[in-house]
Image (tube, helix red, strand yellow):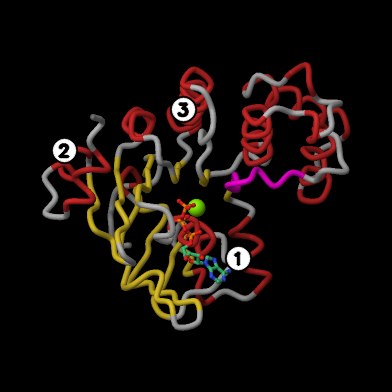
Amino acid sequence: MTSETSEIRPAVVFDNVSKAFGSKQILRDISFAVPAGRALCILGRSGTGKSVTLKLLMSLIKPDHGKIWVEGDEITRLNEAGLSKVRRKMGFLFQDAALFDSLTLYENLALPLHRLTTKSQDEIDATIDNVLSQVGLAGDKQKMPVSLSGGMRKRAGLARALVLEPRILLADEPSSGLDRITAAEIDELLIRQKTQHQTTVMVVTHDVHGARSVGDLFAVFDKGSLAAFGAAAEVEQSENETARRLISEY
Ligand SMILES: Nc1ncnc2c1ncn2[C@@H]1O[C@H](COP(=O)(O)OP(=O)(O)OP(=O)(O)O)[C@@H](O)[C@H]1O
Ligand SMILES: [Mg+2]
């Protein structure tokens, strides 16, 4: 947190974070930092605490030990009012997209804009049209979530994560279950978000090919620990075999 230049100022810091559920230790002394405007891809086998890590960052769950900072705010010390302010900076695409099934796609996007911004109705409509065209769903805004395909749901979830113009975008398996071309389109979108809007991006993914096109940095979780962290070339040289296997494409 003492960095002089804004370019390398960390947007997110985990400092010795641990989390258990009951007697099961999920994360143990996790420490890493994501510089602002960079993309981190989180890799790891199923059940290693990747989704838990994003949920800790959103303060949907609390760590047992350790500190978490978001853009200089230590969120592990904030009260609910402080937390809502920090959450407002983050867009979260949940693993299951988490759309409101009784609302149309348009209404799903309009809800946070009505609740959390002072935009006029015309501005809200323009924002929604803009974000839906970014994710390729411009013609689908009156559809109900149930009538969307899996790939469309993912893109709708991403649109909802983007609609408040977050400074930090968290995406939990944004391209899982999608064909290669649609997955690549989602990856493009994440890259564009980072390069055009300087958004800090954190993506959990099992798709190493996509991860390597999106990520500047990689974190590999293994058995509750951070097994490797760094650029692809560094993770390839990791002492941890799982990390080396997960980062290699073939
Ligand atoms: N709210 C919770 N209560 C109890 N256990 C939980 C809770 N959330 C997660 N867990 C457990 O924590 C572990 C890690 O879960 P997490 O969802 O982070 O895995 P993951 O790495 O995202 O896996 P996947 O790749 O399958 O999505 C799992 O064993 C899970 O059952
Ligand atoms: Mg998960």
Q: Position of residue 135 (x, y in %)?
A: 63, 24
- State the quadrant of the C terminus: top left
Q: Position of residue 241 (x, y in %)?
A: 17, 51
Name the disc covering residue 187, or none. 3
Proximity of marks 3 and 1: CB atoms separated by less than 8 Å: no
Of the numbered discs 2 and 3, the one sitting upstream in the chain is 3
Name the disc covering residue 32, or none. none
Q: Is residue 121 visible?
A: yes
Proximity of marks 1 and 2: CB atoms separated by less than 8 Å: no
Give above or below for 149 relative to 12. above
Give the labeled residue for mark 1.
60
Q: CA distance from mark 2 to mark 3?
A: 20 Å
Measuring 86% from the left and 26% from the top, which residue is drawn there? Answer: 142
Which residue ends up furthest to the bottom in the rendered image?
A: 23
Specify few, some or many for label 3: CA neighbours under 10 Å numbering under 14, 14-19, or 20 or more: many
Give above or below for 17 relative to 145. below
Proximity of marks 2 and 3: CB atoms separated by less than 8 Å: no
The overriding secondary structure of the stretch rendered in magenta is loop
Q: Which residues are magenta?
A: 93-99
Q: Nearer the viewer, residue 243 or 229?
A: 243
Give the labeled residue for mark 2.
233
Measuring 54% from the left and 33% from the top, which residue is drawn there? Answer: 177
Q: Is residue 202 visible?
A: no
Give above or below for 175 relative to 235. above
Q: Position of residue 84 (x, y in %)?
A: 66, 62
For mark 3, give the secondary structure.
helix
For mark 2, give the secondary structure.
helix
